Image: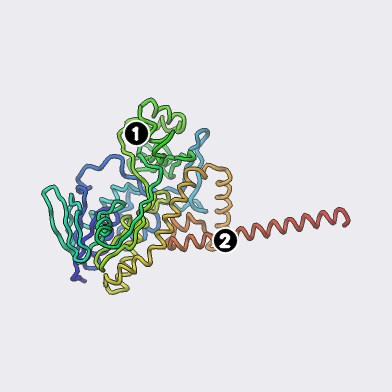
């Protein structure tokens, strides 16, 4: 059913491309604007991908428009973590209690291209690349873009910013409305490396997300269809054993031989990758409100970027698209009502996953190597098997369900309180039995 309103989607990344697919299904005429060249034909920026771990929330969004099979054709399932210690053999930790559930490694670029292809295949869609938003009047929907051929003016009835962490749409709302924002940067950055295929095969187990936990820092690796691994270093940006302190080939080689000894033999281009791939920033975006005048809105990272340590950035953005689509159904495509309602429903959930992602950074870089943590995980999986549906771990709720993130936090807290109470009762019972046995043995 055709709609009278025109929609501009600023940002043709993952969220923008998926949103466009949903909007055209609703009958909207959509124009996409992207500041970068067309990623399907242009040169990919080196070392800026961070492979994605697509899980149930993202898959649910793809299924609703029949894109899951085509998009996931080259995805690789990862059923757990492979922990690489400094010394000794790697150890596998399954994600689920049955060891069967998996998150899916997929190239950000490949996923973006697949979604962009699906979006631009629709007759109601026009896409413009090399268009950098430099002006927006939130009251009228008038926009201005810098392009290689000069300044371009455009207008739309509705403008949705899906242009990521450094959103130009958010910047325009900051300049012209009462929007406020905070950008909380980590003292860690990221840099990508590559472990190539060895004799045409994977050099490591492709069924796992590989982690080298080192306390204040870590490295991870995700498999690719060409049998390589994309590795990401998450290191402090300053101090010793940090990006700033390693600048020469000799220093790089010595550091990896000491801290990541099994990697040096697997990554023949280690020094070149390290020296030439950029250091990316990591942080959390919070802003309010996400909308203005019933015609401009923010979605995905543009509204609520998070750190990548739960693998939920893209999944959360895809869930945004599903929720906005649901609200448009409920409001009869009344954007004046839909945009505020979207923020009202999503804010507590995006705040919840932002905190859980920060917490998971500590878990991944430090706790996963601890015998105590590993024992706790075994107990947790045993409880899930013994109490199916009644006890579910935080990881399973986040990655393998569509339970709202805020409800996940609440449920996990309740479970922890019940376990603490049960443990306390068990200790009291043991103490009472011991006291009874003592009195009986002494005749008291």
The crowd level at tag 2 (other Cα within 10 Å; few <14, some 14-19, many 20+) is few
Q: Which of the two residues, 169 or 91, is positioned nearer the viewer here? A: 169
Q: Quadrant of the C terminus?
A: bottom right
Specify few, some or many for label 1: CA neighbours under 10 Å numbering under 14, 14-19, or 20 or more: many
The colour scheme is rainbow
Give the secondary structure at mark 2: loop
Given the current orientation, which residue lies at the most extreme right position? 443
Pointer 2 residue:
387
- Residue 274 is marked as 1
Q: In which quarter of the image is residue 402?
A: bottom left
Tell me if 113 is positioned left or right of 155 in this view.
right
Question: In the image, which is nearer the foreground, mark 1 or mark 2?
Answer: 1
Name the residue nearer the viewer: 88 or 323: 323
Q: Can residue 62 be seen in this view?
A: no
Q: In which quarter of the image is residue 177?
A: bottom left
Which residue does the image show at 50% across and 34% down from the upper left?
Answer: 86
Question: Where residue 200 appears, x then y in whole percent?
Answer: 35, 35
The answer to whether 51 appears left or right of 258 in the picture is left
Q: Residue at x 48, y 54 (%)?
A: 395
Q: In which quarter of the image is the N terminus?
A: bottom left
Please tell me which residue is depicted at 57% across the width and 43% down the height of the picture. Answer: 371
Residue 11 coordinates in the image, percent (x, y): 24, 54
**What residue appears at the point 38 percent right and 47 percent down from the top-left corner?**
185
Residue 262 placement (x, y as % from top left): 45, 32
Secondary structure, mark 1, is helix
Whether residue 117 is visible to the viewer of this picture, yes or no, is: yes
């Amino acid at each position: 059913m055709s709609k009278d309103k025109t929609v501009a989607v600023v940002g043709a990344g993952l969220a923008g491309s998926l949103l466009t697919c949903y909007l055209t299904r609703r009958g909207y005429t959509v124009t996409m604007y992207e500041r970068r060249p067309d990623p399907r034909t242009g040169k990919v920026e080196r070392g800026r991908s961070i492979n994605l771990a697509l899980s149930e929330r993202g898959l649910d969004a793809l299924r609703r428009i029949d894109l899951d099979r085509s998009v996931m054709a080259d995805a690789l399932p990862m059923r757990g973590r492979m922990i690489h210690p400094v010394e000794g053999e790697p150890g596998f930790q399954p994600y689920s209690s049955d060891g069967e559930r998996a998150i899916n490694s997929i190239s950000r670029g490949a996923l973006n291209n697949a979604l962009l292809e699906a979006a631009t295949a629709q007759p109601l869609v026009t896409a413009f690349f090399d268009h950098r938003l430099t002006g927006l009047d939130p009251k009228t929907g008038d926009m201005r873009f810098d392009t290689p051929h000069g300044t371009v003016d455009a207008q739309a009835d509705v403008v949705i910013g899906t242009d990521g962490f450094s959103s130009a749409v958010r910047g325009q709302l900051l300049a012209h409305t009462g929007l406020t924002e905070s950008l909380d940067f980590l003292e860690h950055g990221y840099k990508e490396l590559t472990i190539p295929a060895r004799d045409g095969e994977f050099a490591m187990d492709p069924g796992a997300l590989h982690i080298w936990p080192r306390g204040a820092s870590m490295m991870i690796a995700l498999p690719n269809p060409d049998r390589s691994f994309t590795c990401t270093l998450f290191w402090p940006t300053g101090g010793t054993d940090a990006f700033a302190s390693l600048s020469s080939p000799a220093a790089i080689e010595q550091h990896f031989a000491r801290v990541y000894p099994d990697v040096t033999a697997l990554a023949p281009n280690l020094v070149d990758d390290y020296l030439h791939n950029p250091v990316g920033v990591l942080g959390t975006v919070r802003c309010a409100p996400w909308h203005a005048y019933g015609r401009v809105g923010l979605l995905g990272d543009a509204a609520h970027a998070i750190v990548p340590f739960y693998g939920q950035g893209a999944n959360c953005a895809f869930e945004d698209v599903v929720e906005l689509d649901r609200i448009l159904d409920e409001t009869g495509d009344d954007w004046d009502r839909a945009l505020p309602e979207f923020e009202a429903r999503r804010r507590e959930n995006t705040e919840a996953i932002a905190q859980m992602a920060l917490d998971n950074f500590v878990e991944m870089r430090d706790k996963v190597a601890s015998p105590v943590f590993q024992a706790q995980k075994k107990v947790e999986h045993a409880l899930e098997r013994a109490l199916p549906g009644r006890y579910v771990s935080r990881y399973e709720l986040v990655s393998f369900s569509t339970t709202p993130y805020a409800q996940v936090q609440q449920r996990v807290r309740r479970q922890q309180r019940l376990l603490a109470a049960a443990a306390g009762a068990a200790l009291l019972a043991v103490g009472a039995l011991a006291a009874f046995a003592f009195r009986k043995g002494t005749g008291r």
